[in-house]
Image: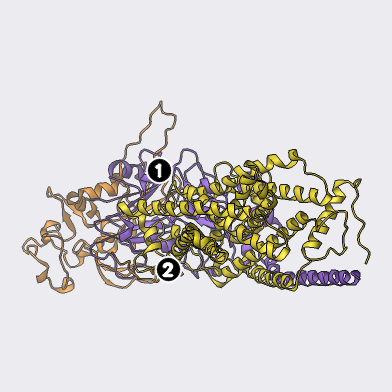
Amino acid sequence: MEPLRPSTETDPNATSFVRFLVDAFDEATNGSRLFYALMIALTAIALVGAHAWANQVVLGMSVTGMTDHVSWGLYIANFTFGVGLAAGGVMMVIPAYLYHDEDMHEVVLVGEVLAIAAIVMCVMFVVADMGRPDRFWHLIPGIGRFNWPISMLTWDVVVLNGYLLINLHVVGYLVYQRWRGRPARPGVYLPFVFLSIAWAISIHTVTAFLYSGLGGRPFWNTALLAPRFLASAFVTGPAFLVLTLALVEKTLGFTVPKRAPELLVSIIRITSLVNLFMLGAEIFSEFYAGGSHVASARYLLFGLHGHHELVPWFWTALTLNVLAVVVLLTPALSARRPVLFTALAMTFVGVYLEKGMGLIVPGFIPSTLHEIVPYSPSLAEWQVTAGIWAVGMMIFTIGVRIVVHAQTGAMHADVGLGADRGGD
Amino acid sequence: MNEPTVGRRRALKVVGASLGAAAFARAVAPLTELTATTNAAEFLAKHYKELDADEIAAMIDRLEQETRTRYGAEVTIRDLKPAEDVQFAYALNLSVCIGCRRCAEACHVENNHDRKTHQSYIRVFEMEASSLDFENGNATYDHAVPAPGKFYMPVQCQQCENPPCTHVCPVEATWQEPDGIVVVDYNWCIGCRYCEAACPYHARRFNWSAPEVPAGEINPDQGLLSNRIRPQGVVEKCTFCLHRTREGRLPACLEACPTGARIFGNVLDESSEIRWVLENKRVFVLKEELGTRPRFFYFFDR
Amino acid sequence: MTVILIHVVALAACERERANDDRVVRSSVDPAQVTEIEIPESLRGLPVGPENPRGVAAVVPCATCHEVPDASVPLPTSARGLAGPHRGLRLEHGDLACGACHHPTDRDALRLADGRSIDLVEAMHLCAQCHGPQARAYRHGAHGGMRGHWDVREGPRTRNHCVSCHDPHEPAFGSFAPMPPPRDRFLPAGEAVPHE
């Protein structure tokens, strides 16, 4: 089979970009058997999720475990966590561009791919949680009715889509230029890079404001919520990236500068401590004076009126986070990569539990009229959630492979499609 | 030789992608059932505030027809506009309410609620006589009423003057009408349930599935913004029975109350009953500290 | 129940008009409107049987047995001694005896505090003499409920008589079963919240 004609200098960007996309996707889907097995498994999970979601749309959200008392659950919990993950991807951008850290430049695009994959997941979780996804167009400004700036949800729509576009632009442009063998023009991407730093902060602040602005939900109505969100985002994002970089080095033969994960780990050292400190401050405020506003926190930590559903989850999350902090602060432990990676995975899971179900569900228990209606996700909810995570992982995998291939030069315009590049 | 390897790889990818696409189509196949319950007109329906009289009439025709086909009942849906110089308010006498729940039952019937879940906008709480704390409240009591040492507090939408629910709606599907009633455009709501999270009074309900109401039990006197049978996946709430009250009639819950604990009317009318209660009884509202300024007032006779 | 039309003077609220007020609202409880008060059967006589097919209850007017003013037979001091169709009547209205309300000689009448006799169906005036706060609230539509229209310019309204709900001999309410509790998916009915 003839390789496609390679791009030349005179090709217009429009056709060349299309060729780039085809080439990128083609190259990213070349891999080992393990890679194919992984992608097939993820596809299968995604299909299970799609089917569960289709059933939910037809039968109604009664297939979930949500009720009028606990009206948000697993989907919104994952959405909240996903926004944090997306914001955390920017953690590499700051040292790379603000502090001109050359080593970080090599890997910063991986963080932005994480942001893209996470935002896509967030949008999918929102759609999964909508009672009428067919009415999605009502949200489009100009065509629907967009209650901006009063509704915080509209701010979230704006900032999340904006963040997605910024990252798509930066990654797309830099990788495309690399593929073309042309230098990247700073004016085209650099302003967006700096914008993405502030924007990343904003996406998670706005998401926190969704909850902290509700006066009727005392568990959420705290000034500390936005700072807590950011601190935990800057734990999970970098943690995921460190683990990803290690995996990339192993599977794609790409040499990651040592300083990059080291810097990320030192960031996590600080942010995980800040995260724990803020949790402590929150717990003190809740429990010292007592009163009825502490009911949700009491339910989460100790159980309330005979209901203890979330107690083991909270203490598990706390244990995982504390153990991770201990490892990170003990050089003898954190110097050993397996221990370090375990700690990073532990804190990732810990924050997932604490910020996901450990934040959303207690906001509804007890209800505004002090009724306790427990919530546990139904099978359909788990299926949809797993499906969306699978899609996110697929996007992330493909995206990282594209970025790394462009970085290593394995993917190049002059080489042309279909030519054997050796290795994967 | 690299080309056969490449060609085989390419062929495998094409096969894989085709299989994936086919599998995806199978996975989401249930969505085709939606054609039975929705149509282009419903999908493209504009926001209530953008409809002129003709479009509202056409929408009402469509909705009545849909009720005919889906529920087998003839109904009349009207779009009653708010009257000028009317601001509704509601008062509830806690010394007289005995917790019989007839108001909740009347609401269930009047508003064509789902029978399976026995839904109602009103939730009656049995409270300790000495405390207004809902920590000591119980809505699921099932014994003879009134029980000694208790009083009863029905809670429904407070139609707040400063409603948190309307602020948070991303698509303006819920708003406060000039006469004070907070309404929902059931054709516009996207079902995100942010309003349900924002409400401090547990006043909102979501249609977790399509409501089931036997044809013979459907209340045919329906309002476009109130008790017409709501579709699946949208939020709804008490509307002070605006299909009745905007015609000067009493809400269903008030008529059903056997002890006369409920008082309703136009608070702008100086000689109205509700005005007398507000001026002569020591009324209070729930969660006043939240600044929602409810229109639903509670009082004790003693 | 037979409904007797009564012009409700008791609902008198003067029609107020302020010439200089832009938002003059015609009173929705204007006394010129007519509100119907449902008079319970027990004030028409003694119930002796079920309703006939036209919905008219079988009541025996008091005068049937008490035709002649019975000045020689004083009112009993308690309900225990009552015989005939009144046997078993319980009187538990505070510390009241029969003569507190009933006219001493005319069994078809009640006696106001100043001695004037009123017809049985006008019992509301007698109730109001002792139960002022409730009567005042009733006059202002805040007691006893109503059916029909909040805005009587738009349509009629029906109110209850005191005796519709309060048996004058045994006014205290008993307790009875409420409508069923809400059917929440994960909140069992009847479960009382245990207090810590």
Q: Is residue B246 visible?
A: no
Provide the secondary structure element on which disc 2 rests.
helix
B94 horizontally vs A80: left or right? left
- Above or below: residue A387 compared with residue B275: below
Please report contact status of discs 2 and 1: CB closer than 8 Å, yes or no.
Answer: no
The number of numbered badges drawn on the structure is 2
C65 horizontally vs A186: left or right? left
Image location (x, y in percent) of residue A346: 52, 64
Q: Quadrant of residue B153?
A: bottom left
Say yes or no: labels 2 and 1 on the same chain: no
Image location (x, y in percent) of residue B97: 31, 58
* Colour of chain B in the image: purple
Residue under numbered circle 2: A312
Residue under numbered circle 1: B291
Task: Out of C41 and A182, give the one closest to the viewer.
Answer: A182
B212 horizontally vs A49: left or right? left
User: In the rendered structure, which amino acid carries the disc numbered 1?
Assistant: Gly
Q: Chain of mark 2?
A: A
Image location (x, y in percent) of residue C106: 14, 59
Image location (x, y in percent) of residue A50: 66, 68
Q: Quadrant of residue C11?
A: top left
